[in-house]
Image: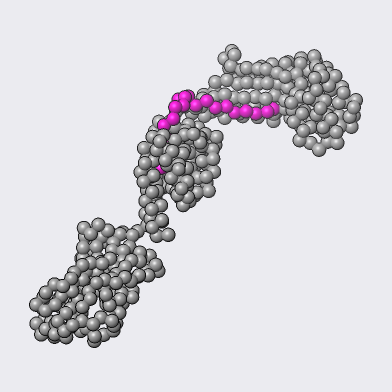
């Protein structure tokens, strides 16, 4: 009799299993499925044996075998024996087969629904089922034997990134900060003496004093200097405006110094006789009828006095508006308080400061706190989100924030942060590879990781290997 193998395609796509071939002449495997429940594995086979005709002293023994991908762990399901007339009754008489197996008389059935089980298999992600066969005759004579792959299940590889944060940067240990403001002190016409109760002076002087006090009263801060720059408006003669700007700036310096008694040289002053830049900014943003023409005069090479006169005579209507509504705002004193912030060394102290005054922290202090936390936790992400909010233009802060965003699956935020990171930095290139992988852009991820590997990013080769496995799997099962 023939005992060669014929080919049959098993379609198992609905179960996520790879179709393969089983070839037993005249035994057709119509379907095969594997399932797991608890600690047991179950195999369902639908066999068509209608074309199997065995002689009286012939039999086929089928043993489904479950194994892991490299066959180092093996478990057998219950065997199936299809026997001719004489061997069938011999097995019944002698009771010499596995009691849990199935015995079928050749020609008695056209279809066989088989359910096998085993609890001797340790669960793995990848497994396969082979159908071992043995064709024999009387007296247990062996005619042929072999094994055919029935089905296999290969778990799709999942990309598992190793995020690279930059947590130690070279920055000055002294944190230098400043607060800026603008005060509009009113002076009587042509006077340079400050009258605190004159018009809105109490409010405007209070703004300067409040800014100074906000630093002086904070134990974490030390004022290093105060700068004042006075401005006058363009009407009148330039020489007189220069006198007013200089004199009023010195008057404000004297007023502040009398209240605080700063050391000599602590308050730095400067002045600008006429605030043409302020006037230009207003005109440019306005909808004035002759906006372009007035801007051309402001930008011209005319001296200040002729320039003001030309605007006044050429466009008297607009000039009257500017004189009333805009020029008063050009008489102002800009001030700047420079100060240092002490360092915070304890992580607990850093976290406490981050909660109420994150602007006091340096990037290194943020990163020092983040290094003590579990990646991906809300607390961890909050550290890097707060750091990038305080330092929105820092490439390193944006890189770390991008990594934190990817750990929580926020790819849109990660893309936004990486756009502000250093494109030439190897760690940024590596992070772009992780983002591409998270989006399923495997070719792009491979390119980024290959570049990062050439630039000696330690985790890049492993990431590149992961991508290669994923691409191979997708190619195999596409």
**Residue 105 in picture, x, y percent from top left:** 20, 84
Residue plotted at (45% across, 46% down) = 445
Residue nearest the observer in this picture, 290 or 443: 443
Residue 461: % across, % down: 36, 41
Task: Determine the residue positioned at 46% across, 52% down.
Answer: 440
426 w.r.t. 243: above or below: below
User: Residue extending furthest top?
Assistant: 264
Span highlighted in magenta in the image:
163-183
234 with respect to 411 (left or right) = right
Q: Position of residue 165 (x, y in %)?
A: 42, 38
Q: Would you say 239 lies left or right of 87 here? A: right
Q: Dividing the picture into quarters, in which one does residue 46 lie?
A: bottom left
133 is higher (above) or lower (below) than 200: below
Residue 150 to residue 50: above or below: above
- Residue 173 seen in the current view: yes
Q: Relative to 160, is 384 on the left or the right?
A: right
Residue 68 vs 83, above or below: the answer is above
Q: Quadrant of residue 320?
A: top right
Q: Relative to residue 241, is residue 359 drawn left or right?
A: left
Q: How is the image coloured?
A: one colour
**In the rendered image, is residue 193 in sight?**
no
Q: Looking at the image, which is closer to me, 466 or 349?
A: 466
Reply yes or no: does residue 166 show up in magenta.
Answer: yes
Image quarter where the C terminus lies is: bottom left
| Magenta run includes residue 280 | no
For image coordinates 14% across by 81% down, the residue present is 57
Q: In terms of image quadrants, where is residue 112?
A: bottom left
């Amino acid at each position: 009799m023939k005992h060669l193998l014929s080919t049959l395609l098993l379609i198992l796509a609905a179960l996520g299993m790879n179709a393969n071939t089983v070839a037993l002449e005249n035994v057709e495997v119509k379907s095969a499925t594997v399932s797991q429940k608890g600690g047991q594995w179950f195999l369902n086979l639908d066999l068509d044996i209608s074309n199997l005709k065995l002689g009286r002293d012939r039999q086929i023994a089928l043993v489904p075998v479950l194994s892991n991908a490299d066959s180092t762990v093996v478990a057998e399901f219950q065997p199936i024996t299809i026997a001719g007339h004489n061997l069938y009754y011999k097995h019944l008489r002698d009771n010499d087969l596995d009691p849990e197996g199935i015995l079928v008389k050749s020609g008695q059935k056209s279809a066989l629904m088989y359910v096998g089980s085993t609890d001797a298999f340790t669960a793995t992600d990848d497994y396969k089922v082979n159908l071992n066969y043995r064709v024999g005759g009387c007296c247990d004579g062996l005619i042929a034997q072999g094994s055919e792959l029935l089905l296999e299940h290969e778990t799709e590889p999942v990309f598992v990134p190793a995020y690279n944060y930059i947590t130690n940067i070279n920055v000055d240990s002294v944190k230098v900060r400043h607060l800026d403001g603008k005060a509009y002190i009113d002076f009587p016409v042509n006077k340079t003496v400050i009258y605190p109760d004159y018009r809105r002076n109490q409010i405007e002087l209070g703004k300067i004093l409040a800014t100074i006090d906000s630093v002086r009263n904070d134990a974490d801060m030390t004022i290093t200097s105060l700068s004042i720059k006075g401005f006058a408006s363009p009407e009148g003669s330039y020489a007189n405006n220069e006198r007013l700007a200089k004199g009023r700036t010195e008057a404000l310096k004297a007023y502040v110094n009398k209240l605080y008694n700063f050391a000599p040289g602590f308050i730095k002053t400067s002045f600008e006789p006429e605030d043409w830049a302020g006037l230009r900014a207003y005109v440019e943003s306005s909808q004035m009828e002759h906006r372009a023409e007035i801007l051309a005069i402001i930008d011209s090479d005319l001296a200040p006095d002729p320039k003001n006169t030309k605007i006044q005579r050429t466009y008297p209507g607009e000039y009257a508006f500017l004189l009333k509504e805009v020029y008063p705002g050009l008489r102002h004193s800009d001030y700047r308080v420079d100060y240092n912030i002490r360092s915070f060394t304890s992580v607990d102290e850093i976290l406490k400061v981050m909660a109420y005054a994150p602007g006091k922290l340096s990037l290194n202090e943020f990163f020092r706190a983040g290094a003590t936390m579990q990646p991906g936790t809300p607390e961890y992400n909050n550290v890097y989100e707060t750091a990038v909010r305080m330092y929105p233009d820092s490439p390193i802060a944006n890189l770390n924030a991008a990594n934190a965003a990817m750990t929580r699956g926020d790819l849109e935020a990660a893309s936004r942060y990486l756009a502000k990171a250093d494109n030439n930095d190897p760690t940024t290139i590596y992070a772009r590879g992780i983002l591409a992988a998270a989006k399923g852009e495997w070719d792009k991820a491979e390119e980024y990781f290959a570049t990062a590997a050439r630039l000696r990013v330690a985790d890049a080769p492993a990431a590149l290997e992961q991508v290669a496995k994923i691409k191979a799997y997708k190619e195999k099962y596409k």
